[in-house]
Amino acid sequence: MKILVFAEQREGNLKKSALEITSAGKMLATQLNAEVEVLLVGNNVASLASQLNGFGAVKILVGEDARLQTYSTTAYAKAIADVAKQRQANIVLLSASQMGKDLSPRVAVKLEAGLAADCTALKVENGDIVATRPIYAGKAMIDVKVTTATKVFSLRPNVFSALTQNGNATAVEKISLELSDADFSVKAISTSVASGRPDLTEANIVVSGGRGMKGPEHFTLIEQLADAFGGAVGASRAVVDAGWRAHDEQVGQTGKTVSPSLYVACGISGAVQHLAGMSSSKCIVAINKDKDAPIFQIADYGIVGDVFAVLPPLTQEIKKVTGL
Amino acid sequence: MKIVVCVNHVPDTETKVKVGADGKLLDPTGINWMLSPYDEFGIEEGLRLKEKNGGEVIAISLGGDANKETLRKSLAMGVDKAVLLKDASVRDSFAVGKALADVCKEISPDIILFGKMSIDYYDEQVPGIVAELLGMSSVSVVVKMEIADGKVICEREIEGGHEKVETELPCVISAQKGLNEPRYPSLKGIMAAKSKPIEEKVPVAIANRVEVLEMRKPADKGAGKILGSDEAAVNELVRLLHEEAKII
Ligand SMILES: Cc1cc2nc3c(=O)[nH]c(=O)nc-3n(C[C@H](O)[C@H](O)[C@H](O)COP(=O)(O)OP(=O)(O)OC[C@H]3O[C@@H](n4cnc5c(N)ncnc54)[C@H](O)[C@@H]3O)c2cc1C
């Protein structure tokens, strides 16, 4: 049995999720007596292979093509599916990132495979892979089984932990991708990635503000705490709708899904639609002056208090610990 | 321009979710239903394209009779025609995509619009499946789009930024919040929608590729620790994040 892991990179930077899914692939491989191959696709990406070294794969496959410098849904999907077929992979793993969710349906159709998307857990039971996925805004979970011979899974970023490297060198093999110009019917002509703070969906720590912040000018308090943690800034829909923050920062059902190690909700009531985007965070801290705010029901730690009184000293204390 | 908009009928987000007797599906009693919120962005974009380029907008929904409610809302917003793919069985993303792709093949639209995802199963996969089955190009999570001379230029959200994407018609687009501001159905629209017919078709039954083994409520985390409300609470929080949660 073979597991193929698609290692995502953007603009020549390997995504942290690549290590997470390689590790998840290794976990499955151990139980299924399978082997893991990792696939890196792009232009000038061979140098990224070393970052995947020692995570339990037997081989790192590198497929390069100058036209893959920018992302193309159609070309990337074809490359992944072609390699999966050539290598006779039974299982294909992708990240449930924006890129992974764009690619996985096409890859699955090409492989005539069933697809379980945005999984938050995988386990092997009687030789079957059982995947867990949150549904109905996180108000329920389902365990699913993919019934086709080839199976595709996309895994939610930040949920699967990366193994520690085992020190064994992983072989790297250059492979050729047979892409024609017609495969590039969809292509990115430019990308703009905000620099500075980490991306919301990949950040280890997210500090979010809601209507309790009272106005856009007070979001500096949120930004300062996020920077003290080296984290990202999020927002509730109420503040996005009010025009205080850009939609990119919205967390929730009609915003982003995040699963950081730590989520700090400041002046956010905790509406179900907000919880839908952050309830899989590992540790949740809520700061709210209303002790009955629903956010306290899912918070691990809560401070019942005014954000304007709590945030400045909290930022000071965090800075002392992190040194940022 | 021939425009198809795929719309889904889903449980209202505020509604209480209970696991049904079979332990695999939702218990439908007492559930409030609605048009999946992202699909409204798809409908709005379809209507705007028609207003600009002429043509017709056809809304398609796969499901049981209850889906007619969502199709009526689409008609009330201004959609010209509605098609119900009548099949109340539970289909996975592939089976849904296959049924939709089959009708789209007959209609042969210039563009197929979707919401980014349906808020029941959260798959975010059906638009891509339909595009791949039809051999069409597709752009997902679109926040801006422009069509000129058959060329489609979109802006889509990616991790930490935006991407400008180029493709050609026909294509599949999935809409993210921000693409437009969906209109409310007008009284005239609501009245007109009542008398517009909803065409019914029966999709070919195909096997699911994903089987649900169990549905359950997420594990109850139990109440967290309230650390109080004074200065000491801040110090206690920092200590707990450091020593107990080991995050910093
Ligand atoms: C279809 C649909 C989709 C939606 N999608 C999303 C989504 O993706 N994301 C999302 O977030 N919401 C979403 N919503 C909206 C959601 O229902 C809530 O309206 C929203 O989350 C509320 O934002 P909030 O918590 O910032 O504001 P509020 O509910 O107004 O809460 C503000 C909180 O701040 C507290 N507060 C006030 N002042 C202070 C202070 N000085 N110090 C401390 N605390 C203070 C208050 O006690 C209150 O709890 C959606 C709604 C619908 C219908």
Image (cartoon, rainbow, N blue to C red):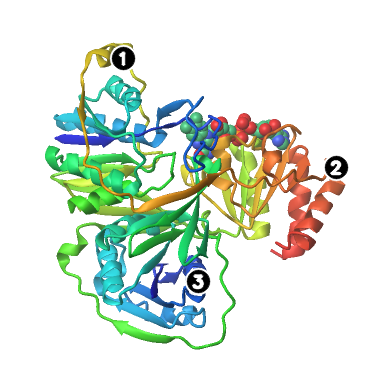
Residue B51 horizontal side relative to residue B14, left or right:
left
- Residue A314: x and y in percent read 76, 51
Quadrant housing residue B52: top left
Residue at mark 3: chain: A
Tell me which residue sits at (30%, 43%) in the image.
B96
Identity, as a three-letter code, of the amino acid under mark 3: Leu
On residue B39, the disc is none
Identity, as a three-letter code, of the amino acid under mark 2: Asp
Q: Eyeballing the image, is A180 above or below A108? A: below
Number of residues whose C-alpha sits closer than 10 Å to that of mark 1, classed few (under 14), some (14–19) or many (20 or more):
some
Is residue A323 at least partly visible in the picture?
yes
Tell me which residue sits at (52%, 56%) in the image.
A120
Quadrant housing residue B216: top right
Residue A148 horizontal side relative to residue A300, left or right:
left
Front-lying residue, A224 or A18: A18
The residue that disc 3 covers is A19
Front-lying residue, B79 or A105: A105
Task: Label 2: state its secondary structure.
Answer: loop
Residue at mark 2: chain: B
Query: Are labels 3 and 2 on one chain?
Result: no
Tell me which residue sits at (81%, 49%) in the image.
B234
On residue B190, the disc is 1
- Residue B208: x and y in percent read 33, 49
- Residue A169: x and y in percent read 49, 88
Q: Eyeballing the image, is B49 above or below A174? A: above
User: Marks 1 and 3, Cα distance to the nearest angstrom?
Assistant: 52 Å
Task: Label 3: state its secondary structure.
Answer: helix
Residue B60 horizontal side relative to residue A121, left or right:
left
